[in-house]
Image: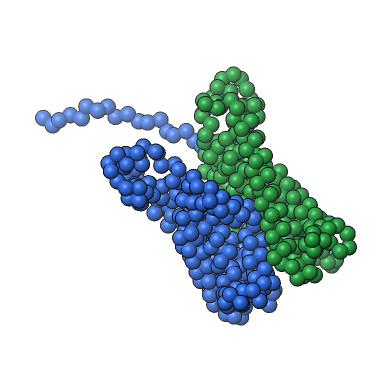
Chain colours: A blue, B green
């Protein structure tokens, strides 16, 4: 005799139909508006697609895109080199180390990047004889160098604050445990404290890079031909507003690509901190 | 002494011009706040409903205006607004219209502020336990009153740290309007530099003014934060 299936067959009640709430009507309306706007944008970019403008300025804008990437990578990387000593000086109890670090951080975080850039770029021109006499004029002569210097110091100051916050968020028990195991201060810092702090710092650091991508557009104001600079040039010559839309798309691609990478990086690096069956 | 003369008021000095610029900077920063805050709150409420289409629409807005450089947003609003408005006006008459720089700055900075503020408000919404809303409904408060009397006061307390960060960024961000020929602090000092050839001095003064503004507002906001948290001190 075949085994009888004893589980009673039940039919589930049908899922309740989604009603048209006010929120849903509004949401559909607004999403529709975005779709219409997007379609209009695509239409206007293709309808009066000017192959001459595109052929002339397209490659230049790609070059600008590449320069923007270089500016951001360089200033963030060099900034991180000055950030660690600054953060340590800021946390030190010695006022001779602490005070300059506070002044540095407050100045660069408290003033607009544009003002810092102007101070360096135009200010260097004013003290040209002095700079020439100490043999540094070749550096400040180039707008690009002034730009890099101010971006690097700015990013360094922001990263120093991020690091400081992250380092002080590591529980004191960690360093006490390391000391009781007989680890030296240096080993404790680099092998115990810093790795944990960097995981905390990961998200704000990602935000800082995004902030830098966006701020780097300021370079165009002092004649640097980054993505923004090339775009402004193309607009002033062709009066074709589409170039700004193309630039916006390129910036959004840059920022979103970084965000996706960063999410992936964070998931990977914090794998050991999650419960084993938690989804990642 | 010579430098002090440069800052004096009157025909020989630039003190009065710089003050006018400072006034533009401060009024622009403050005038953007109501739009940015209300816009951000509405966006956050939309994202908090859980209604998929509404969340999507709000997220598209946030992604665009959080990802674009403020400078580019400003140019798009200023030049794009100019072109669009001109086309619209030309439908009726052929007069020449010009977009006001202050208004363009207000719109561009307001959009960016709203996008960032919505994320701050959203995480504040998530910090308010669901029970608060449920208790309010159980007490018979209407949805409006539950929001106004129960959720909003807690929302303000929870979002203030994030918002004061945002305010600092925004205050410095107003410096960008100098490139669309709005006479803010930076542009006024550029004019002064053009006349006196003293960039080091004037831009140092500008930096000092900004530092004191950010320091003062962070002190002020810290006091407000303390006051709002007085029921939550351990």
> In this view of the protein, can residue A217 be seen by the observer?
yes
Q: Looking at this view, is A190 or A29 the one in front? A: A190
Above or below: residue B29 compared with residue A258: above
Residue occupying the point 59% across, 30% down = B229
Q: Residue at x 61, y 54 (%)?
A: A107
Regarding residue A142, the answer to whether it shows in the image is no
> Is the residue A182 above or below the residue B229 in the image?
below
Picture quadrant of residue A240: bottom right
Query: How many numbered marks appear?
Result: 0
Estimate the x, y position of residue B35 in percent, counting from the top left. Answer: 70, 46
Q: Can you name the residue that lies furthest to the right here? A: B11
Q: Is residue A138 left or right of residue A259?
A: right
Residue visible at 24% across and 28% down?
A: A7
Find residue B9 and report its horizontal and vertical position in percent: 86, 57
- Picture coordinates of residue A222, whole percent (x, y): 65, 70
Residue at the outermost top position: B139
Q: Quadrant of residue A20?
A: top right
Q: Nearer the viewer, residue B207 or A220?
A: B207
- Location of the N terminus of chain A by quadrant is top left
Q: Residue furthest left?
A: A1
Q: Is residue B70 left or right of residue B194?
A: left
Residue at (64% x, 55% y) in the render: A111
Give the quarter of the image for residue A213.
bottom right
Q: Residue A156 placed where, x, y %? A: 52, 58
Work out whether residue B87 or residue B200 is closer to the camera in this orientation and state it.
B200
From this view, report whether residue A10 is shown above or below residue A186.
above
């Amino acid at each position: 005799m075949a085994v009888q299936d004893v589980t009673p067959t039940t039919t589930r009640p049908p899922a309740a139909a989604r009603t048209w709430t006010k929120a849903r009507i509004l949401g559909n309306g607004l999403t529709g508006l975005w779709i219409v706007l997007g379609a209009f944008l695509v239409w206007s970019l293709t309808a009066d697609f000017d192959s001459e403008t595109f052929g002339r300025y397209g490659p230049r804008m790609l070059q600008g895109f590449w320069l923007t990437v270089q500016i951001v990578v360089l200033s963030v990387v060099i900034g991180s080199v000055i950030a660690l000593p600054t953060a340590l000086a800021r946390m030190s109890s010695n006022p001779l180390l602490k005070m300059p670090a506070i002044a540095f951080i407050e100045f660069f975080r408290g003033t607009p990047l544009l003002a810092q850039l102007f101070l360096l770029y135009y200010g260097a021109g004013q003290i040209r004889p002095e700079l020439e006499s100490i043999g540094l004029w070749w550096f400040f002569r180039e707008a690009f160098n002034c730009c890099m210097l101010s971006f690097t110091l700015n990013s360094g100051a922001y990263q120093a604050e991020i690091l400081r916050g992250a380092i002080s968020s590591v529980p004191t028990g960690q360093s006490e445990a390391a000391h009781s195991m007989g680890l030296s201060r240096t080993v404790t810092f680099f092998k115990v404290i810093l790795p944990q702090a960097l995981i905390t710092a990961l998200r704000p650091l990602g935000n800082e890079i995004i902030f830098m991508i966006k701020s780097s557009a300021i370079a165009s104001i002092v004649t640097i031909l980054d993505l923004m600079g090339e775009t402004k040039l193309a607009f002033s010559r062709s009066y074709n507003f589409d170039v700004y839309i193309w630039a916006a798309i390129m910036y959004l691609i840059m920022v979103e690509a970084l965000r996706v990478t960063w999410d992936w990086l964070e998931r990977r690096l914090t794998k050991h901190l999650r419960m084993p069956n938690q989804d990642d | 002494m010579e430098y002090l003369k440069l800052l004096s008021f009157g025909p020989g000095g630039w003190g009065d011009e710089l003050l006018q610029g400072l006034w533009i900077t401060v009024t622009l920063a403050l005038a953007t706040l109501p739009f940015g805050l209300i816009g951000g709150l509405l966006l956050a409420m939309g994202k908090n409903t859980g209604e998929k289409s509404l969340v999507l629409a709000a997220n598209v807005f946030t992604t665009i205006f959080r990802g674009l450089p403020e400078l580019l947003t400003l140019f798009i609003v200023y030049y794009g607004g100019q072109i669009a408005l001109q086309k619209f006006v030309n439908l009726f008459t052929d007069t020449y219209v010009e977009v006001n720089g202050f208004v363009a700055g207000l719109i561009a900075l307001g959009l960016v502020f709203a996008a960032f503020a919505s994320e701050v408000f959203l995480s504040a919404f998530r910090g308010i336990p669901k029970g608060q809303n449920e208790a309010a409904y159980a007490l018979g408060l209407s949805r409006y009153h539950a929001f106004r009397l129960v959720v909003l006061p807690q929302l303000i307390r929870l979002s203030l740290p994030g918002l004061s960060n945002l305010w600092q960024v925004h205050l410095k961000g107003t410096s960008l309007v100098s490139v669309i020929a709005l006479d803010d602090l930076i542009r006024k000092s550029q004019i002064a530099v053009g006349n006196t050839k003293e960039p080091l001095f004037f831009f140092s003064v500008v930096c000092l003014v900004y530092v004191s503004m950010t320091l003062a507002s962070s002190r002020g906001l810290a006091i407000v934060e303390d006051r709002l948290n007085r029921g939550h001190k351990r």
